[in-house]
Amino acid sequence: MNIRQKFRLFFIAPVLVMAAARSSATPTPATMAGYWQGENYIVSTIQEHNGEFVVATVYATKLPHSQNLLISSSYSNTVLTWKYCPPAESCVTAETVSLSGDSLIVNWTDEEGGSGQMTLIRVESAPQP
């Protein structure tokens, strides 16, 4: 094996293998549709219908036999807003701010006057009620 062949084998081949591995990775969807987990293991299911988004369900995955906590959902001017009521807690209204890969930033308010911002993380599957 000459020097040129060794160079190709030891330096170029690994670069090509790494590039192929990166290109075969599943890309992050650039959509709000999916399952989003927030604080206290609350998972919101967002669906897309005709270019608009709707929250279909909200479950507290840490609670056994969790019921759908969703009260309402609306979409206007690219902002998704939804309200849910966890058991024995104040109801929460969430409003989307931005989407970046697997992170969805939302502003929230509760019925006791609390407010803030949180990051929902995309999760792979729907909660099991």
Image (cartoon, rainbow, N blue to C red):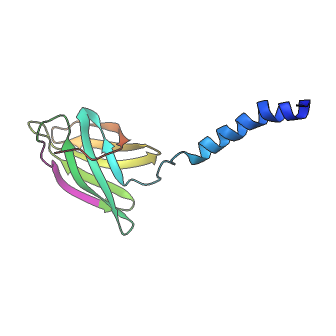
Q: Magenta residues, as a range?
A: 66-74
What residue is drawn where x is 31% and y is 61%?
75
Of all residues shown, which one is farthest toward the left? 88
> 55 left or right of 32?
left
Residue 26: x and y, percent?
A: 50, 47
> 50 left or right of 86?
right
Does 34 appear above or below 19?
Answer: below
Task: Report the quarter where the C terminus lies.
Answer: top left
Q: Nearer the viewer, residue 110 or 5?
A: 5
Task: Report the quarter where the N terminus lies.
Answer: top right
Looking at the image, how many numbered discs can be counted on the residues? 0
Residue 60: x and y, percent?
A: 19, 40
> 26 left or right of 56?
right
> 62 left or right of 51?
left
Residue 96: x and y, percent?
A: 35, 49
Residue 104, located in which quarter of the rendered image? top left
Q: Nearer the viewer, residue 114 or 120?
A: 120
